[in-house]
Image (cartoon, grey):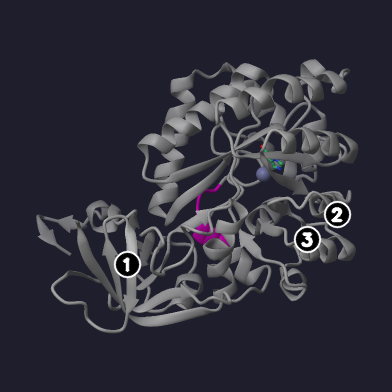
C-alpha cells in the first residue's frame, strides 16, 4: 500500500454541519483514500510538505458544456453593441452555431478540444467535472458527445459525470415541429443513453426561446422513469418559474437562477434542491447583477458554484475566476465559496459520499494552493495559484514541472 502524508498549516475541511475548519496538521493518504486528518505527526510516513500553502478538497465543477467544436468570439462585439444572448440564438446563432460546428466535427477533433480543456481545468485545481451534451441535438451527435466524455473519463485524471442535455435548443430542422423533437428525445435518445449508461443526469434549458415549462414537465417525467437524475437550467434570463418546477420534481440541482423569484427560492429550499450558481456567466452576459446567493443561503439552500464552461456565455475553465465573481459580484465569503466548489458541488452531482471534503474515508482528491491562507487565493485575483493537484492519492499536476525559469546568458534570474 502506498501511504504518505500531506503537511499543512491550512487544511480546509468541513465538519458535519458544513462549517469550514482550517486545520494545522497532517492528511494521511493510503492508496487512493484519505485515512485520517490529524494534528500529530504520523509515524514513519513520507511527508509532502505544504506547510506554508493552503490545501482544499479537489475542486468540483458541477456545470460545464465540455464537449463541443469551435468558438464564438464573433458574438462578443454583438453583445457589446447591445444584442442579447437570446436574440443571437433566435437568429440562428449562439447554441445553434455551435451545433453546426459540432455536427461537422470528427470525433477525434471533438475529443482533442475537450482534452485540452480538461488539462486546463486540472491545472487550475478541478478534479471532477460535470459535462453536459446538447450541441448535437440529433441522435448521432448527442451520443458522440456522451461517448467522448466517457472515453475521457477513462483516460484523464479529472473524473467526468455526464448529463444528457438534448433539450438545449430546438434544432433548425425541427423549428416547425417542436413536438417531433421532444418525441425524438423521449423515444430514442433518452432510452439509448440510459441503456448504455452514457449519462447519469438529464438537463433542460427551460427558457424563453428554448424549452417551455410544459415541455420540461413532459421531458422530466420521461427522464425520471428511465432513472436519470434531474437538473434544470432554471430562470437564467427570463423568470419563467423554472425554480418552482425544479422544486416540484425534487431535482438534484437548479442551475443559474439569476432571475429566480422569492417564491422560487423558498420552494427550492423546502425541497432540498442544490443551487448551482454561475457568477462568471452573469458577468459575461453583462447582466449587471448576479443570482441572489445571499438570500438562497439565508433560506437554507445548499449553494454550489461552477464555471458553466461553454463557447458562448462563459468561455472559461477556471474555477479561480469563478471565485473572483462569487466574492466581488455576489459578496460571498471565502468559506462560502470554497464550500460551494467542494462540499456543496458534490451534492449537485450525487458524489457527496466520496468527494468534496478532506476527511477520513473520502477519495484523496486535493489541491495545494501556493497561498499562505485560504483568503489569499481569492484576494490575489486573476492568476493561477495551484501548486499541485492530487487525484485519488496520486500527484497529477505539479506546477514546478511546468514552471519556465527565466534565464539570460545561461544564468538563473
Ligand atoms: O452555448 O450558449 N446558457 N446554454 C444555456 C448555454 C448558455 C451554452 C451556450
Ligand atoms: Zn449551462
Asked if disc 2 is less than 8 Å from ligand 1, the answer is no
Between the residue at mark 3 and the residue at mark 1, the CA separation in whole angstroms equals: 34 Å
- Going 15% across and 56% down the picture, which residue do you hit? 408
In the rendered image, residue 261, in percent from the top left (x then y), is placed at 87, 61
Q: Is residue 386 visible?
A: yes
In the rendered image, residue 356, in percent from the top left (x then y), is placed at 49, 62
Q: Which picture quadrant has residue 260?
A: bottom right
**Disc number lying in front (1 or 2):** 1
Q: Which mark is residue 244?
A: 2
Between the residue at mark 3 and the residue at mark 2, the CA separation in whole angstroms equals: 10 Å
- Going 17% across and 57% down the picture, which residue do you hit? 407
- Going 50% across and 59% down the picture, which residue do you hit? 353
Q: Which mark is residue 209?
A: none
Quarter of the image where the C terminus is located? bottom left
Query: Who comes first in sequence, dot 3 or dot 1?
Result: 1
Mark 3 highlights which residue? 271
Q: Is residue 317 located in the magenta-colored stretch of the structure?
A: yes
Q: Secondary structure at mark 3?
A: helix
User: How many neighbours does mark 2 have within 10 angstroms: few (below 14), some (14-19), or many (20 or more)?
Assistant: many
Q: Which mark is residue 35?
A: 1
User: How many neighbours does mark 3 have within 10 angstroms: few (below 14), some (14-19), or many (20 or more)?
Assistant: some
User: How many neighbours does mark 1 have within 10 angstroms: few (below 14), some (14-19), or many (20 or more)?
Assistant: many
**Whether residue 120 is situated above or below residue 387 in the rendered picture:** above
Q: Which picture quadrant has residue 406?
A: bottom left
The residues colored magenta run 316-322
Q: How many marks?
A: 3
Q: Secondary structure at mark 2?
A: helix
Q: Is residue 388 visible?
A: no
Query: Who comes first in sequence, dot 3 or dot 2?
Result: 2
Amino acid at each position: 500500500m502506498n501511504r504518505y502524508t500531506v503537511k499543512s498549516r491550512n487544511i480546509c475541511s468541513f465538519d458535519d454541519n458544513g462549517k469550514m475548519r482550517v486545520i494545522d496538521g497532517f492528511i494521511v493518504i493510503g492508496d487512493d483514500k484519505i485515512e485520517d486528518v490529524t494534528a500529530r505527526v504520523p509515524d514513519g510516513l513520507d511527508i509532502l510538505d505544504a506547510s506554508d500553502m493552503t490545501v482544499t478538497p479537489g475542486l468540483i465543477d458541477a456545470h460545464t458544456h465540455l464537449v463541443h467544436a469551435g468558438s464564438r468570439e464573433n458574438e462578443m462585439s454583438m453583445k457589446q453593441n447591445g444584442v442579447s444572448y437570446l436574440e443571437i440564438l433566435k437568429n440562428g446563432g449562439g447554441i445553434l452555431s455551435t451545433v453546426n460546428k459540432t455536427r461537422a466535427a470528427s470525433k477525434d477533433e471533438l475529443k482533442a478540444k475537450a482534452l485540452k480543456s480538461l488539462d486546463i481545468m486540472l491545472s487550475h485545481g478541478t478534479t471532477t467535472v460535470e459535462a453536459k451534451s446538447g450541441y448535437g441535438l440529433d441522435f448521432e451527435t448527442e451520443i458522440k458527445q456522451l461517448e467522448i466524455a466517457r472515453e475521457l473519463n477513462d483516460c484523464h485524471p479529472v473524473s467526468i459525470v455526464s448529463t444528457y442535455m438534448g433539450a438545449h435548443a430546438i434544432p433548425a430542422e425541427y423549428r416547425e415541429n417542436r413536438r417531433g423533437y421532444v418525441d425524438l428525445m423521449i423515444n430514442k435518445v433518452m432510452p439509448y443513453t440510459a441503456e448504455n449508461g452514457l449519462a447519469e443526469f438529464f438537463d433542460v434549458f427551460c427558457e424563453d426561446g428554448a424549452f417551455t415549462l410544459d415541455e420540461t414537465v413532459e421531458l422530466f417525467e420521461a427522464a425520471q422513469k428511465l432513472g436519470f437524475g434531474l437538473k434544470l437550467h432554471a430562470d437564467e434570463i427570463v423568470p419563467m418559474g423554472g425554480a418552482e418546477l425544479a422544486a416540484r420534481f425534487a431535482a438534484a440541482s437548479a442551475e443559474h437562477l439569476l432571475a429566480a423569484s422569492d417564491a422560487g427560492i423558498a420552494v427550492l429550499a423546502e425541497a432540498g434542491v442544490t443551487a448551482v450558481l454561475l457568477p462568471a456567466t452573469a458577468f459575461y452576459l453583462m447582466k449587471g447583477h448576479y443570482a441572489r446567493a445571499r438570500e438562497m443561503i439565508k433560506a437554507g439552500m445548499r449553494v454550489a458554484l461552477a464555471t458553466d464552461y461553454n463557447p458562448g456565455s462563459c468561455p472559461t475553465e477556471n474555477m479561480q475566476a469563478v471565485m473572483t465573481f462569487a466574492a466581488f459580484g455576489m459578496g460571498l465569503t471565502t468559506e462560502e465559496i470554497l464550500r460551494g466548489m467542494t462540499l456543496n458541488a458534490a451534492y449537485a452531482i450525487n458524489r457527496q459520499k466520496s468527494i468534496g471534503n478532506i476527511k477520513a474515508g473520502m477519495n484523496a482528491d486535493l489541491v495545494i494552493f501556493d497561498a499562505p491562507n485560504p483568503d489569499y487565493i481569492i484576494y490575489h485575483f486573476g492568476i493561477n495559484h495551484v501548486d499541485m493537484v492530487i487525484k485519488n492519492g496520486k500527484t497529477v499536476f505539479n506546477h514546478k514541472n511546468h514552471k519556465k525559469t527565466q534565464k539570460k546568458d545561461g544564468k538563473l534570474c
